[in-house]
Image (cartoon, rainbow, N blue to C red):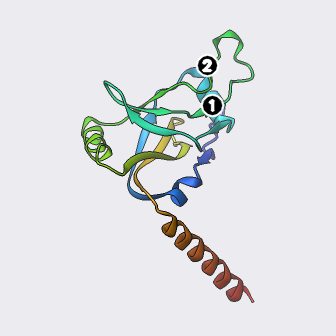
Amino acid sequence: MAISANINIKNKRASFEYHLLDKYVAGIGLLGTEIKSIREGKANINDSFCSFFEDGLYIRNMHIAEYSFGSFYNHESKRDRQLLLTKKELKKLREKGEEKGFTIVPLRIFINERGYAKIEIALAQGKKDFDKRETIKERESKRELDRVMKR
């Protein structure tokens, strides 16, 4: 069985809504049918967020579609899943995340070369409306510049 390492599920709204400060790559505690659905590309992290519970960091509201061949062993599609980070990284994220205005957002899910599902998360600070307008202006000017350069 060939491992398809071309899975790259992105949260496109994250860079528009937040200033991304520190990025981390974490493992995800998954069930068997969940990893099979991710390998089929049937996951969504657009509305998901990360929060701390007693013992660790969890991703909430991440949707992984039920596996089509899963029978009664199938998983719940929107359950909380634990993120696997080192104690040092967890401590740093907990300290920064408790400060006012900071949050932890998922950026993308991918399959690494060993076949494990990983998630890239970022410590982020919310943008104001004028920051979002500035982002739109930069994107449009870059697009216009690319159009002129192609001629």
Mark 2 neighbour class, 10 Å CA radius: few under 14, some 14 to 19, many 20 or more: some
Which image quarter holds the N terminus? top right
Q: Name the side, left or right, on which 127 lies relative to 9.
A: left
Q: Nearer the viewer, residue 69 or 23?
A: 23
Residue on which disc 1 sits: 64
Residue 2 visible? The answer is no
Asked if the residues shown at circle 1 and circle 2 are in contact, with their CB atoms under 8 angstroms apart, the answer is yes
> Which numbered disc covers residue 75?
2
- Indicate whether 144 appears above or below 18: below
Across and down, in percent, residue 33 comes to 62, 22
- Indicate whether 68 appears above or below 95: above
Across and down, in percent, residue 90 comes to 30, 38
Residue at point 61% right, 20% down? 76
Farthest top residue?
72
Residue at point 48% right, 40% down? 49
Residue at point 31% right, 24% down? 54
The image quarter in which residue 34 lies: top right
* Cα distance in 3D space between marks 1 and 2: 9 Å
Q: Nearer the viewer, residue 14 or 84?
A: 14
Dot 2 lies on which element?
loop
The image quarter in which residue 89 lies: top left
> Which numbered disc covers residue 110?
none
Q: Nearer the viewer, residue 63 or 32?
A: 63
Dot 1 lies on which element?
strand
Q: How many marks?
A: 2
